[in-house]
Amino acid sequence: MFLELSYLFGMDEPKWPTNPNDYFVFDSSMSRGDNCNASTIHHHMHNGTHVDSPRHFTRKGLTIDQLPIDQFCFDKPLALKIPKGKGERLVPEDFSPYGEQIADCDILLIYTGYADLRASDPKAFIDDFPCFSAGGAAYLRKNFPKLKAIALDVLSVDSAVTGVSDGFAAHHALLDRDETHLERTLLIFEDVNTKLLFESKTPAKRIYAFPVRFKGLEAAPISMVAEL
């Protein structure tokens, strides 16, 4: 049995406030008398459920096509419910009680509960959503060498309100490779429907999160599925 954890893509989905809108062009349509239906999508790579590669915030980081494809398959998922409200941050103290469990997982899927607003109140969902502190991101990267990725139920690991002024510190803490960030980078999956993992009566035994990979780009839309 499988659970689809990625959201369907559409033209009116909630997104980071300054991202361009997605839209579709119906190049040919049988309803207009054409002999087939064919369409073009205009999609921003950070709209909807997607993955950030290291190139997103580092000039020399790996692009999405340079990452080995097995980086997107996870055999030891761990889902944590860590309730957070508007403007709150995920900090090291949120994770330390689960240290033994996190140490054995390869992807950490976090449900803050804020994504409950995604369908019912999209404006509230994109407004000062909870996210990572730089310290919370660094804590996961430095202390859990088996961890390959994190997945979050909100739009970004950084705040839409303070992300720019903070220098997108959480992204850098997870993606940078330099003299101060020596550990392997962690993939970042954003806008993931992690709530489904807690509604299921059967735990997930594996997560597949395969991207649509464009050459040279820093991110990709994904289809994330949990195998129960």
Image (spheres, helix red, strand yellow):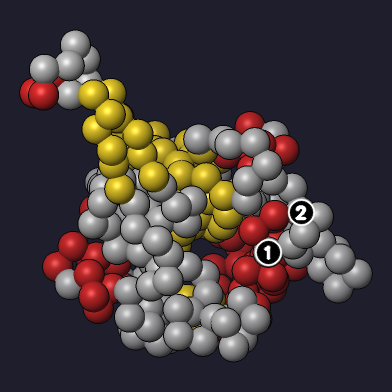
Is 112 left or right of 205, judged from the image as shown?
left
- Left/right placement of residue 216 relative to residue 214 reads right
Q: Which disc is residue 117 wearing?
A: none
Above or below: residue 146 compared with residue 37:
below
Contact between marks 1 and 2 (CB within 8 A): the answer is yes
Q: Residues within 10 Å of mark 1 (few under 14, many from 20)?
A: some
Q: Is residue 128 left or right of residue 162?
A: left
> In this rendering, does residue 149 appear at all?
no
Give the residue drawn at x 29%, y 63%. Answer: 14
- Mark 2 Cα shell of 10 Å, populated few (<14), some (14-19), many (≥20): some
The residue nearer to you, when weighing 185 against 204, is 185
Name which residue lies at 69% across and 70% down: 172
Image location of residue 166, percent across then percent down:
61, 86
Q: Amino acid at mark 2?
A: Gly
- The residue at 14%/68% (across/down) is 120
Q: Amino acid at mark 1?
A: Phe
Q: Which image quadrant: the N terminus?
A: top left
- Residue 216 % position (x, y): 68, 42
Residue found at the far right of this picture: 179
Residue 214: image x %, image y %?
A: 58, 36
Q: Which mark is residue 61?
A: 2
Q: Quadrant of the C terminus?
A: top left
Height in image: 83 above or below 33?
Answer: below
Residue at label 1?
A: 57
Q: Is residue 185 left or right of residue 92?
A: right
Q: Is residue 123 above or below residue 20?
A: below
